[in-house]
Image (cartoon, rainbow, N blue to C red):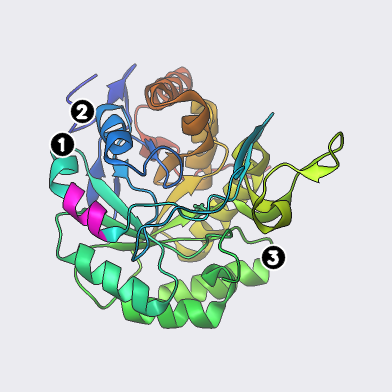
C-alpha cells in the first residue's frame, strides 16, 4: 500500500477517489452514525483505514439523545432510534484542528432542527478547516420532527439558505426514496443549487421490530419505531444511488451507504455509480478494522476481474 494520504493501491488496484474536489485515499469511510461522537471515537476513526473522518450529526446544543434501549443488533443489521446524541456543534468545531492532524479529510455532519439552526452551524463550519459539510436532512428519530428530505418544499428553502454561506462543498444526506416520482422531484431540486454531493441513504425510518416472546418492540423511543440499518437495506441503497446517478449525471457526486459489509458490497455500490461508500452498522458491530478489510476485499475482487482503478467500473452496471 502507498502513503495513506495519497492513494491506496492494493493488488494493483488504485482505490483513490474524490468527492467534491476533495481527494480520498480510498473508497471506504465511516458514516455519520456509530462510533463517531466523542473525541476518543473520532481519534480511532482517524487512526483507522477510513478514508476520512466523519462526525456524528451535530445540533446547536449538546444532546443526550433518546431513552434506552435505543439500539439493537439484528441478524442482518440493526434498528436504532438514537435521537442525535452529540456534543453540540461547537465541540466539533474545536476538535477540527486535532482531527486534521490525522492527515485525512474531515467531514462534519450537521442536523439542525430548523433552517436557522442549519444556517448557524454551516456558517460556522464554513469558517473552519473542515473539508466537506454533510447536512443531514433525513434523521427519522426525533419525535415531532418530520424528515426534511420527504418535504420537497422545505428541502428547497433549506438548500437555498445553506448553499449560499461559503465555498466549502455542501452535501445532503438523503432519506431513502421508493417511488420514481420522488427521485425525479428531488433530483430536480438538487440541480437548482450548488449541492456538490449527496449521501444515499439514511436508515429506513419508522421501521418496527417486535419481540414475539415479550410481545414488545425491541427499542423504546417512539413506541419502537426506528431506523432499519445494515444488510436489510442494501437493495434500497443501491437503487437510490443508481437512480440519482442516472438523474444527476456526473454533476453531483454520490456517497453510498446502506449494508456495506464486504468488499463485494462496496463493488456493487461502485457499479451503481457511487463515488465513495460509507460504512455504519458494520463499523458498529465489528469496530475500526472493518475499513481495511472492506478495502482489501474490494481490491481483491476488482483485481480478479482485471480492473486497476475505480473508474474502470464506476456506474458501469450492465443491462440484463
Ligand atoms: C440518530 O441519531 O437518531 C440517527 C441519525 C440519523 O438517522 O440521521
Return the residue at label 2. Answer: 4
Query: Which one is in front, 250 or 181?
Result: 181
Tell me the SS state at disc 1.
Answer: loop
Q: CA distance from mark 3 to mark 1?
A: 40 Å
Query: Which one is in front, 53 or 182?
Result: 53
Q: CA distance from mark 1 to mark 2?
A: 8 Å
Disc 2 residue crowd, few under 14, some 14–19, many 20+, Cα 10 Å: some
Return the residue at label 1. Answer: 103
Q: Does mark 1 have its CB less than 8 Å from ligand 1? A: no
Query: Does residue 193 appear in the picture of this structure?
Result: no
Tell me the SS state at disc 2.
Answer: loop
- In the image, 141: left or right of 100? right
CB atoms at circles 1 and 2 under 8 Å apart? yes
Magenta part of the protein: which range?
Answer: 90-95
Mark closer to the chain start, 1 or 2? 2
Return the residue at label 3. Answer: 179
Q: Is residue 229 above or below residue 204?
A: above
Disc 3 residue crowd, few under 14, some 14–19, many 20+, Cα 10 Å: few
- The residue under the point 38% across, 52% down is 86
Pinpoint residue 175: horizontal percent, then vertical percent. 56, 60
- In the image, 300: left or right of 230? left
- Res 78 quadrant in image: top right
Tell me the SS state at disc 3.
Answer: loop
- Res 100 quadrant in image: top left
Mark closer to the chain start, 3 or 1? 1
- Is 273 inside the magenta-drawn segment? no
- In the image, 7: left or right of 176? left
Pinpoint residue 123: horizontal percent, then vertical percent. 23, 71
Pinpoint residue 74: horizontal percent, then vertical percent. 68, 33
Amino acid at each position: 500500500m502507498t502513503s495513506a494520504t495519497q492513494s491506496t493501491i492494493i493488488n494493483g488496484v488504485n482505490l483513490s477517489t474524490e468527492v467534491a474536489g476533495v481527494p480520498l485515499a480510498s473508497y471506504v469511510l465511516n458514516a455519520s452514525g456509530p462510533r463517531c461522537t466523542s473525541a476518543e471515537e473520532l481519534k480511532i476513526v482517524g487512526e483507522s483505514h477510513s478514508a476520512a473522518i466523519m462526525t456524528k450529526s451535530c445540533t446547536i446544543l449538546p444532546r443526550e439523545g433518546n431513552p434506552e434501549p435505543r439500539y439493537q443488533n439484528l441478524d442482518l443489521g440493526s434498528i436504532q432510534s438514537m435521537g442525535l446524541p452529540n456534543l453540540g456543534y461547537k465541540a466539533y468545531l474545536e476538535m477540527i484542528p486535532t482531527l486534521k492532524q490525522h492527515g485525512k479529510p474531515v467531514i462534519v455532519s450537521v442536523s439542525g432542527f430548523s433552517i436557522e439552526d442549519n444556517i448557524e452551524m454551516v456558517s460556522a463550519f464554513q469558517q473552519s478547516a473542515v473539508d466537506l459539510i454533510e447536512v443531514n436532512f433525513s434523521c427519522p428519530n426525533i419525535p415531532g420532527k418530520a424528515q426534511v428530505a420527504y418535504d420537497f418544499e422545505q428541502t428547497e428553502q433549506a438548500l437555498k439558505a445553506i448553499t449560499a454561506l461559503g465555498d466549502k462543498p455542501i452535501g445532503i444526506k438523503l432519506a431513502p426514496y421508493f417511488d420514481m416520482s420522488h427521485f425525479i422531484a428531488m433530483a430536480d431540486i438538487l440541480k437548482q443549487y450548488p449541492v456538490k454531493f449527496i449521501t444515499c441513504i439514511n436508515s429506513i425510518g419508522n421501521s418496527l421490530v417486535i419481540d414475539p416472546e415479550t410481545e414488545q418492540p425491541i427499542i423504546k423511543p417512539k413506541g419502537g419505531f426506528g431506523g432499519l440499518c445494515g444488510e436489510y437495506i442494501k437493495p434500497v441503497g443501491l437503487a437510490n444511488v443508481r437512480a440519482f446517478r442516472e438523474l444527476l449525471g456526473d454533476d453531483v457526486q454520490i456517497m453510498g451507504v446502506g449494508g456495506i459489509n464486504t468488499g463485494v458490497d462496496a463493488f456493487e455500490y461502485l457499479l451503481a455509480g457511487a463515488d465513495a461508500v460509507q460504512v455504519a452498522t458494520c463499523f458498529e458491530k465489528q469496530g475500526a478494522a472493518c475499513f481495511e478489510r472492506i478495502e482489501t476485499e474490494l481490491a481483491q475482487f476488482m483485481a480478479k476481474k482485471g480492473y486497476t482503478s475505480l473508474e474502470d467500473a464506476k456506474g458501469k452496471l450492465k443491462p440484463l
